[in-house]
Amino acid sequence: MRLNVVDTDRCVGCQVCMFACSRLHGQPGLGANRIAVRSAGGMERGFVAVVCRACADPPCAAVCPNDALAPRKGGGVLLKPDLCTGCGHCRTACPVGAVFWDEKDQKPMICVHCGYCARHCPHEVLAAEES
Amino acid sequence: MLPQDTLANVLYVDLSRRRHRTERREDLFRKNLGGAGAAAQLLAENCPEGTDPFSPDNPIILATGPLCGLFPLASKTVAMFKSPHTGNLGESHAGGRSSVALRMAGYGAVVITGANEKPGYLAVHGDKVHFRDARALWGMGSLFTAGRVIRENEPGPGLRSIMRIGRAGENLITYASVTTESYRHFGRLGLGAVFGSKRLKAVVLSGQRGLPVADLKGYRDLYEEIHRAAVESPAMKKYHDLGTPENVRPLNKLGGLPVRNLAAAGDERAEAISGERMAEGYLGRRLACTHCPVGCVHIAALREPYEREAYFYKTSMISYDYEPTYSMGSMLGVFQPEGLLKLLDAVEKVGLDSMSAGVALAWATEAFEKKLISVTETQGVILSWGDVPAYQLAIKHLVSRSNEFYTLLGRGVMAASGKYGGREYALAFGGNEMPGYHTGPGAHLGYLFGARHSHLDNAGYSADQKNLGKEPPPPEKLVSGLVAEEEWRQVLSSLVLCFFARGLYPPETVSRALECCGFDMNADQLKALGKDVLRTKYAFKVREGFDPRAESLPERIFQTPAPGGAIDRGYVERAISAYRKELGL
């Protein structure tokens, strides 16, 4: 499974996906979302959805000095929290800004492509598809 | 409420001293939940009797509620202040990202007092509070530009709310609005002018945090239930498809759409500005408030050629809703979609309440027609129904307060008709210009006695439509229904739930949602709270001089037949006595 942004032009900016992700990760509100929606330079221009691209050769994993980011089947990475020192190189390496940051634990938060957000997207912007 | 919940934090900001402090107010939120309930209490605490609305003492209160950030459609921010437009209770609600941003910044409410010495804006990012310079933003012609500059200077994209004013607020037009997220408004009763009087160009709020819940699994289950109901509800689909302009066609057909300063209540040409025609011809994008799956905000794309240069076009994205379609459209005899959009854009750029502005221009057009005013007053503008360029020019004069006439018009139809006459067709209720429903006695009584003189206070227009074709209920019954509705709406607005979601949140669901936030309130206790909040608001109104005996209804509403026929004066008088009795006035 892999999360895909199917059509950003359908996005109304409700951010229901962000709340879904954070809720799933045990933090109602917006404390743990691994997806972000923001305007494309003012509401008049529509929206951008920032999600992990599930790279086949993930730059975030490549720069991890402790192999804390293991390649995931179907693309993307899985975090091994015990190995992570919170250096933040992964965050800098991701060109789309999809490595989110847990300020409390000082560790990255990265999408696991479960599709929970897509199931809550009311306007068919997001879809979880077979990779 | 839960002890860890940041909802209980109230941020007090004093612009004069450039100081701020945060106080835990669990008492306030435990009793009043948040939103309208908490704001009404904070207003009573922070606005001394007889405060001049433009003095630094007038507080600006912004409040959110416990369900915000946790449940869908809890998306409104309630603003309270003393209104410079009516000289009494100021209350206005806006969506956009404002409410979630306030909650995520870690506060249940903000109280802003004092005034900036020079133009400034306030930026609140979590517990960091900044007093920023806004001298370069003051006087900017377009609110879109001011929004862009602030956006580029502040952190928190995707998580912030930027509430700003335009030239109307700076120039103290008493019905200036505050705009948030380009297209949402604290539209009514002049919050924008209160910002202006404080030389406060904007308030930026942002933050990000998890919120505590009493039982994670129970919370998730209830969330799913409400989310499913929201996305499957036909009412929600209606607002998504056409948005509030969906109402233009049925109201016009019914004969309840005010036309040309309510000289009529319908016009076949209004079909051209119906929700259906606007969507087919111009709909360019839909937007949602944060945490609302509906997305009712409709934005038109207007492509216009430059007159002096071939093949040179500009495209503007312009928000349209039912109320502005009435006030800047049918009320002014403007039935061409492009003309309507140009007028909406003109008021959006300067930050005027489109409703009061439209009604003021409609009064002026009729007064011009009846020769109470002439080109001497209008600075050469020949006001006539449907004349878009003339209205564009009049809006410029109005915002600039270019002479005594426009200055008075910028204080509303009561001020203007007080000087020039024409009170019988000055369509204001309690000093506030009328909304777009001429559906019967319920609507007009609701405007007159609703605590903020809004159709949303008690949905009188809905009561009228339900009573159509039936024997009218005794006036006492109509009134008790309106009061009960207004009381329940105090609960909804204390929870900051969008009124469109009222069907999704019956009292039992509200109780269950509140339980997740650590509140134990059953349906009866909620209803008692609603009564209490409305009484608190009315106590403020009476203290500040609201006297129902001194209020009168504009003659025009009795002259133009409503859908059920001409409104009966005797019926209305009995209803007014009933209203006074119900509210203890």
Image (cartoon, rainbow, N blue to C red):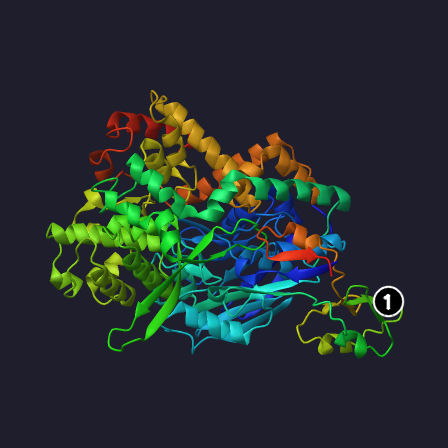
Position of B110 relative to B166 (above/below): above
Q: Name the image quarter holding the C terminus of chain B.
A: top left
Quadrant of the rendered image containing residue B304: bottom left
Does residue B549 show up? no
- Which of the pair B317/B441 is nearer the observer? B317
Pick out the residue farthest to the front: A130
Horizontal arrangement in the rendering, residue B435 relative to residue B307 (left or right) = right
Position of B43 relative to A6 (above/below): above
Chain ID of residue with mark 1: A
Looking at the image, which residue is at 66% across and 40% down? Answer: B225
Q: Position of residue B138 (x, y in %)?
A: 40, 74
Q: Residues within 10 Å of mark 1 (few under 14, many from 20)?
A: few
Kind of residue at badge 1: Lys
Does residue B76 show up? yes
- Residue named by callout 1: A80
Q: Position of residue A31 (x, y in %)?
A: 71, 60
Looking at the image, which residue is at 37% across and 65% down? Answer: B349
Pick out the residue farthest to the left: B371
Q: Position of residue B518 (x, y in %)?
A: 71, 43
Q: Position of residue B336 (x, y in %)?
A: 26, 55
Pick out the residue farthest to the right: A82
- Which of the pair B521/A17 is nearer the observer? A17
Horizontal arrangement in the rendering, residue B36 relative to residue B541 (left or right) = right
Dot 1: element: loop
- Which of the pair A71/B394 is nearer the observer? A71
Q: Name the image quarter holding the N terminus of chain B.
A: top right
Looking at the image, which residue is at 30% across and 41% down? Answer: B257
